[in-house]
Image (spheres, rainbow, N blue to C red):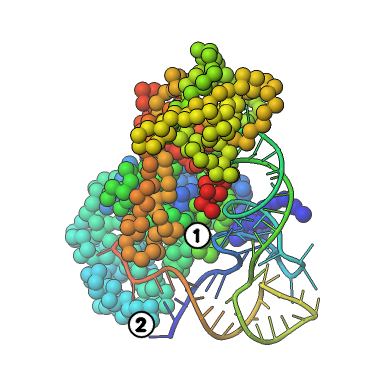
Amino acid sequence: MSDEKSLNFIEEIISQDLAAGKYKSILTRFPPEPNGYLHIGHAKSISLNFGLAEKFGGATNLRFDDTNPVTEDTEYVESIKADLKWLGFNWIKECYASDYFDQLYAFAVQLIEKGLAYVDDSTAEEIAQQKGTPTVPGTGNAYRNRSIQENLELFAAMKAGQFGDGEKVLRAKIDLASPNMHMRDPLLYRIKKVHHHRTGDKWCIYPMYDFAHGQSDSIENITHSICTLEFIPHRALYDWCIEQLGIFPSKQYEFARLNMTYTVMSKRKLLQLVQEGHVQGWDDPRMPTISGMRRRGYTAESIRDFCDRIGIAKRENYIDLSLLEFCVREHLNKIAQRRMVVTDPIKLVITNYDQDEELLHSENNPEDPNGGTRPVPFSKELWIQKDDFMEEPTKKYFRLGPGLSVRLKSAYIIECEGFDKDDAGNVTTVYAKYFPESKSGSDTSGIHVKGTLHWVSAKHAIPVELNEYDRLFNVEDPSNAEGDFKSYVNPHSLHSVTLAWGEPALLTDALESRFQFLRKGYFYQDINSSKDKLVFNRTVTLKDTWAKEQKK
RNA sequence: UGCCUGAUGGUGUAACGGUAGCACAACUGUUUUUGGUGCAGUUUGUCUAGGUUCGAAUCCUGGUCAGGCAACCA
């Protein structure tokens, strides 16, 4: 009956909470750790968190989860903010877990005072051993029975820098036999004499995720704290801390993270690709990072559309890369300026064309009636695609071949009269006659052809460089394939065309324009492109049913 | 041998005890001055065994399978 999309399970929860009067309005948060660049998986979480707030009339905080100074940096903070803005999302408050370090410390003291936390002198190995295994309960140690007073003094001494890294930790005193490993006296604080990108050297003890995240949510009055499935076992601890501290009860909900075919999504793996030179950087157009996708020519709209379409649920999912490609094609088809570029040229000579040259006009976008036209120069010698000519055409081939006719886009119908070959047997030049009365827009020739080719006037052509990208991996699931995922990197993921011929309009087009190079794909100017040397990245190919036909 | 999640076409995602739908993919046909776009259509699914019910993808019980949990990471 209704056209409305059904609610996902989190929206369901929120609408119930709101209907029950549990909250007047909702507050969500997007909590990245500033230790890497945002990728398409983050985009799913971003779209969810901001989308929820938008849908239910709430707001979203951006919070940097900067509790581990070892790997974090301001560089990442800046890139994350830039990516978020580019995607089109606005946070109401910019927060940092590090802003709460004093408060968090006070919380820890409260726990100690309640006899719910203790300082442990054990090594990491000892602690791990004493935790037991999922099927074997853990055992305590003598430190667990330290007095509140002693714990208070020791924790203060930890803060004061009286101990070295790893000498002592603060642990919650919960249940060493809990079936949930995360409840077996989890670590709350550890000593790290490391410079923090925001708090500098003020602190030498830093809270663990489990002691920082829930409390940060609570401090900010986050109503719905949404994270991915791997945090399910942490939820008991999240609730425990909030309950023991008696603070605002934020609630955690978990959804399944994004997986996509032919790529990897973990920061660790992406970092390896960068460091080991499989790609040229975090913003390499083959990377699933927001910065890489932006450079490749993806639009923010298409990424948001993708995030809407993949849905939110708790089951593991593996999204087809083709859905992402569909989303970007759909958007680009509507907005991209059409241009002609010949990527693998052979010469076409119009034998009966006696004029010097003429200016034709071609529509900028057939999808947009108000898109206007651009002038395209035509002359006796043109460049066409090498694969648009076949010496011995097959039956379903409706391009150029001896005796065959085609239309040159926005120009004339031509008929092939012959061709030249070099000593190696390669076709070098194709000869054709044109029909003057078949001129585009005023065709009175009555000739009907099946194929239309793109072309560029040879003497007006401008050189352009093209980066044609293909999937980064040659298996669907590189993360779970046997052996090192990097051995599945597609060696042909980048094909550079150093010399292609483009129509002169490209010289005057705006740098940020989205292009469709007719019959080739969607392209976007690379950040290193200049008027002296135009470089375009292929965002995605056009759908190519002819290529499919040929494979049969 | 523990605990926690989950299981609907090839891939995602709906159906809230009452006609298994939508999107992508694939495949037809049609239109087309892009083998693009558009339009029309086709194929393919409820993990399993019982139970409750007039009626089960949905509720109950057992099983199977998949993923997660034992970082001084987040």
Total labels drawn: 2
Residue under numbered circle 2: A136
The disc numbered 1 marks a residue on which chain? A
Residue A94 vs B49, above or below: the answer is above
Q: Is residue A480 above or below residue A40?
A: below
Q: Is residue A550 left or right of residue A464?
A: right
- Identify the residue at horizontal 62%, vertical 48% (top origin): A55
How far from the left and from the top, in percent, is residue A91? 49, 42
* Label 1 sits on residue: A318
Q: Considering the numbered disc 1 on the image, is that residue within a helix, a strand or a loop? A: loop
Kind of residue sitting beneath label 1: Tyr
Q: Nearest the camera: A426 or A160?
A: A426
- Give A516 or A256, whichever is nearer the viewer: A516
Place of residue A45 in the rendered image (x, y in percent of width and height, measured from the top left): 49, 52
Q: What chain letter is assigned to the residue under label 2?
A: A
Tell me the CA gap for discs 2 and 1.
Answer: 34 Å
* Callout in the foreground (2, 1): 1
Of the image marks 2 and 1, the number of the one nearer the N terminus: 2
A33 to the left or right of B32: left
Percent coordinates x, y for residue A323 in the rendering: 54, 51
Q: Secondary structure at mark 2?
A: loop
Q: Residue at x 44, y 22 (%)?
A: A458
**Residue type, mark 2 in image:** Val
Crowding around mark 1 (Cα neighbors within 10 Å: few <14, some 14 to 19, many 20+) is some
